[in-house]
Image: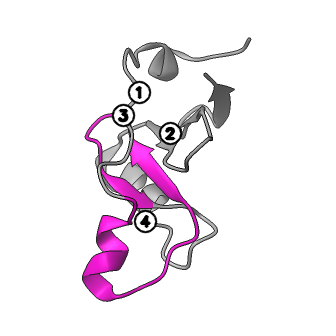
Amino acid sequence: MKTCAHIKSIKTVRHPVKQECAECVKTGAQWVHLRVCQQCGATLCCDDSPNRHATKHANATKHPVIASGEPGERWLYCYPDDLFVEY
């Protein structure tokens, strides 16, 4: 299985505290799917959502890895290495 140093550094996968995009809630926007930053735990919307908050967060903070925040999905994604890994 191909992986990277960013994903290897994740010891415990963070899951969403709430099933909502924190940034979309502030503005009343809608989201499609949720992603969870594995560095700070922020739960934000995916790139199929109009505001793409998870990617904006990763670009602004340089936090490299997200996990799916969707029930039943178990994968991590590394932005710098453009790599998905199921766990």
Residue 69 percent location from the top left of the image: 49, 48
| Horizontal relation, residue 43 to residue 34: left or right | left
* Residue 79 against residue 47 in the figure, above or below: above
Q: Is residue 29 magenta?
A: yes
Q: Which residues are magenta?
A: 19-44
**Residue 83 appears in which quarter of the rendering?**
top right
User: Mark 2 vs mark 4: which is more N-terminal?
Assistant: 4
Q: Residue at x 54, y 40 (%)?
A: 79
Q: Amino acid at mark 1?
A: Val
CB atoms of marks 1 and 3 within 8 Å: yes
| Horizontal relation, residue 55 to residue 43: left or right | right
Q: Which mark is residue 13?
A: 1
Q: Disc 3 to disc 2, how far (Cα)?
A: 8 Å
Q: Amino acid at mark 3?
A: Arg
Q: Which mark is residue 14?
A: 3
Name the mark nearer the viewer: 4 or 3: 3
> In which quadrant is the N terminus drawn?
top right
CB atoms of marks 1 and 2 within 8 Å: yes
Residue 76 percent location from the top left of the image: 56, 33
